[in-house]
Amino acid sequence: MDYSHIPFPTEDMGPHIQQRHFFISADLGQSNDYTAISVLERITTGEGWLGYRGNGLREHHLRHLERHRGVSYVDIADRLTELFHAPQLEDHDRALIFDRTGLGSPFHDMLLASGFRAALTGITITGGDVPTFNNRAWHVPKRDLVSSLQLLLQSGNLKIARGLQDADVFLDEMAAFRTKITASAHDLYGAKGTGHDDVVLSVAMACWAATQRKWRFGNVDNM
């Protein structure tokens, strides 16, 4: 497959790059809905004991977006495997994250059968208050996912690659995204009217994972 259109960085980024991690994230669509896939890079820079918890200064770069409609889950799994093995990522630690809210275990099992192990994490989106981990997946309030994305955007810490495919879709979805407080004091998040939020959720899951203190990564030897 030709990856030349994907703006992953391949150049030497200088002596102050400590770490580079990639987060491939998929929001899976049901039936005829869109499935959105994003690739986020987290770059840790600086010399010595810098930044939060001494991990250096971090930047987040949205490197790739794509959407699929009317495509089988088998094909989506194959596409995620292709992206995981993209030559621009082969020397770096990667994480594969997917929304298992609707499909539950079957898609998780499909990815495990494809060879993913340490690199794979499922996220079940909930309406709760605190993220928890059980039954092979994180259970994360939608509020936490959206807040992670919003904080990175508002602080200028999320960079969008120039000429990024579907960047306009992402920005349109962000503009239409709304928060609603119900009569029972619960907060709801979603696209205005009948709009889509698949790209927003894909990027939000990647941002949430990238801002956690620890995350599981893999490479070609232990995906």
Image (cartoon, rainbow, N blue to C red):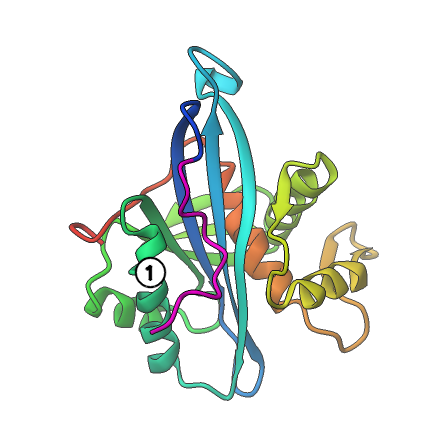
| Residue shown at 84% from the left, 56% from the top | 183
Q: Where is residue 37 in the image (x, y as percent from the top left)?
A: 50, 65
Q: Which amino acid does label 1 sit on?
A: Ala
Q: Nearer the viewer, residue 88 or 181?
A: 88
SS state under label 1: loop
Q: Where is residue 12 in the image (x, y as percent from the top left)?
A: 40, 37
**Magenta segment boundaries in residue numbering:** 1-12
Q: Where is residue 212 in the image (x, y as percent from the top left)?
A: 47, 36
Q: Is residue 127 visible?
A: yes
Q: Does the magenta stretch include residue 221?
A: no
Is residue 175 shown above or below 210? below
Quarter of the rendering containing residue 194: bottom right
Q: Which of 125 and 28 is in front in this view?
A: 28
| Residue shown at 20% from the left, 53% from the top | 220
Quarter of the rendering containing residue 111: bottom left
Picture mark count: 1
Q: Position of residue 216 (x, y in %)?
A: 32, 42
Q: Farthest residue in the top direction?
A: 49
* Quadrant occupied by the C terminus: bottom left
Badge 1 is on which residue? 86
Horizontally, residue 74 falls left or right of residue 192, namely left
Is residue 208 shown above or below 101? above
| Residue shown at 33% from the left, 81% from the top | 74
